[in-house]
Image: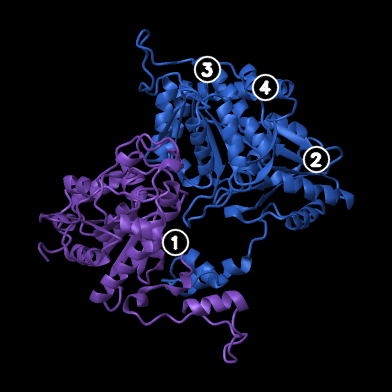
Amino acid sequence: MTLESLEKTAAEGPPPESPATAGEPTLPEPPPSAEKRFLRYGMMPHMLCPGCGHGIVFEAMLRALSSRYEQLDDIAFVAGIGCSSRVVGYVDACTLHTTHGRPLTFATGLKLARPELKVVVVTGDGDGLSIGGNHLIHAARRNVDLTCVLFNNEIYGMTGGQLAPTTIPGAYTSTSPQGNAETPFDAARLVEAAGATYVARAQSYRTREFEEVFLQALDHRGFSFVEVMTDCTEYFGRTNRLGNGADLLFSQARVEPAIDADLAGRSTLQEVPPRPVRPVLEMGVLHESSRPTLDQAMKLSGAGS
Amino acid sequence: MLTQIEGSKAVAEAVGLCRPEVVCAYPISPQTHIIEAVGAMVKAGRLGSCQFINVESEFAAMSVSIGASAMGARAYTATASQGLLFMAEAVYNAAGLGLPIVMTVANRAIGAPINIWNDHSDAMSVRDSGWIQLFAETNQEAADLHILAFRLAEELSVPVMVCVDGFVLTHAVERVDLPEQDQVDRFLPPFEPRQVLDPDEPVTIGAMVGPEAFTEVRYLAHALQLQALARIPSLATEFAAAFGRRSGGLVRPYRMEDAETVVLALGSVLGTVKDAVDSLREAGHRLGVLGVTTFRPFPAAAIADALSSARRVVVIEKAFSIGGHGILGADVALALGRSGRDGPRVHDVVAGLGGRPITEASLRRMLAEASEGRLPDFTFLDLDRGLVERELRRMDATRRSGPSAENLLRDLGVASTRIG
């Protein structure tokens, strides 16, 4: 659709429906692109906000999967509660929706029952690092053979923008109206220290790099962890006056002093500069090692298979 | 001060007027607006030195509250649904230790299947924990009950849970008369803890107790609830004198004179029930309403007294004991059975699960059946029997019939999730 046609519509109202479709409600045909064949169209419209980085990451996941798989029947997606976890509802695969924070425990049970399945856990910074943080370090310690993708948008999006354990110091959320006084987790380094055997970090700004590490994580035998930085436009972006979805996306690429230096000491939201400034984070593969996985240690599957 | 205010904000304002010293919570719908509003009050400097802490889970929220209360601080938290279940161990712990924490529960259903809307399954799941449980009918009462809750909790050193219907009350904007600070200060004296961790007078809180005294410790908790049963009515009278309106108390009768059929319920549904009863009375049905404000301790004698001349009781409840019966209904039947009188017949009607609207039309239909003696003992309001039967047939026909909740949604055309 062109801008011209949009303006025409705005000025003159919608064009008359063609006789072939007038009065006939029609379901949207799935577009032919490879990644979109994995979508559950019955679940549309999705619940992500305009500009949300999760949709970008989700599309990149599907694109990566479509480069590798014809169908997803041998993959089980497990998710908890939150905006990130919700995207699993849109994948046309075996999906297990769990309670808040517990996807890694459900996934551990799933993997032990069906070691031959590829298991992908989709979690968020609230789900995976806060209420489910304990399970994250233990899944890493056990080296459970699965891939955990943690969407880090630095906030609780689904409940309306509360403080998360990843919120940048000084940032405003609905439960840190004075600015966050706490130190955030470095999720990637946390799981590495806990024993994960593949750890990478990516961002919604560079989806090709995300796809690359996501595929490596899928190939990895053992607990593979991909932290992907995404943006909550509605609550984090807006509350902190950091611009729209595009502004936030570009801010991921900028190499500037951390946001905390900028926000600290500012008493009102109005004083926050309109341009977003993000901490510089190390991207790419951060750690890779090899040791027996949980199912190997329990002799559920052949070593090294 | 009269104001138009969202239920959550009215609760937050009331909590703020009670001068909490530590507030700690984890976001969960439909509670979150309450804690956000308290956070904003702390930020605005309205709560003095009150400490507001974000934690990693509800389990941590209650645990922090326990620590704060054990140090003699007035502690408050709020949660709902899965959050209340997740903190259940600490909920029992707070009651077992006799720490006067006040908690709002913005009542919401429990999954699976996940459902964010209102019913009472969450509060019912911890009804045996030793917490006092009060249910608000309106936003005015939701605000008032918190002031009463702090007073009651601290007098008896028992934790109090104020149950406020999620969305129906928490997200509804209503007219609320918010008290003035000096009124609340006169009603609620500064917290004088019965037990406090103090280096000058060291004590142990939370010691292990074996069979030699555990029964007695538990009976003591029961005795405190019995004291609350005696104290709640007089406290409601004191409240009325201090604030000029009635809130709290054990039970609240409405048009009970000459009522043959009495409807008994908890929480906000009472408003719709009263409307239904008003219109049925005009049609000649002799109906009355008994609202239960205090659910734990259970006001058995007050209920049996109020129902003494009724022929039948219809208990409407937003939760039930799966495989058993209604929860409030069973308590009412027991209260009547033990009263030694030939009591009315108790009909249990489960309604409003997971946010299904309890409409006046459905209530009128059901109550007309009841007053004509045609209502079964245990029913579900507006149950779509066809939907259930279809799934039962599917389960019979195919072993791998798939997840039922998703099947039902597909039958309703709500979602088209693929199976297998």
Is A57 left or right of B172, judged from the image as shown?
A: left
Report if residue A21 is visible in the image.
yes
Residue at mark 3: chain:
B
* Relative height, residue B1 to residue A293 (above, below): above
> Could you say whether the residue bearing mark 2 is in a helix, strand or loop?
loop
Name the amino acid, label 1: Leu
Q: Nearer the viewer, residue A101 or A7?
A: A7
User: What residue lies at 76% left-to-right and 58% top-to-bottom?
Assistant: B361
Q: Secondary structure at mark 1?
A: loop
Q: Give the residue number, with chain letter if any, for mark 4.
A: B235
User: Same chain for the residues at labels 1 and 2, yes or no?
Assistant: no
Q: Position of residue A140 (x, y in %)?
A: 21, 50
Secondary structure of residue under mark 4:
helix
Q: Among the chains, which one is purple? A: A
Badge 4 or badge 2: first in the primary sequence:
4
User: Circle 3 is placed at which residue position?
Assistant: B191
Give the color of chain B as drawn.
blue
Q: Which residue is mark 2?
A: B310
The Cα–Cα distance between marks 2 and 3, rounded to whole angstroms, is: 43 Å
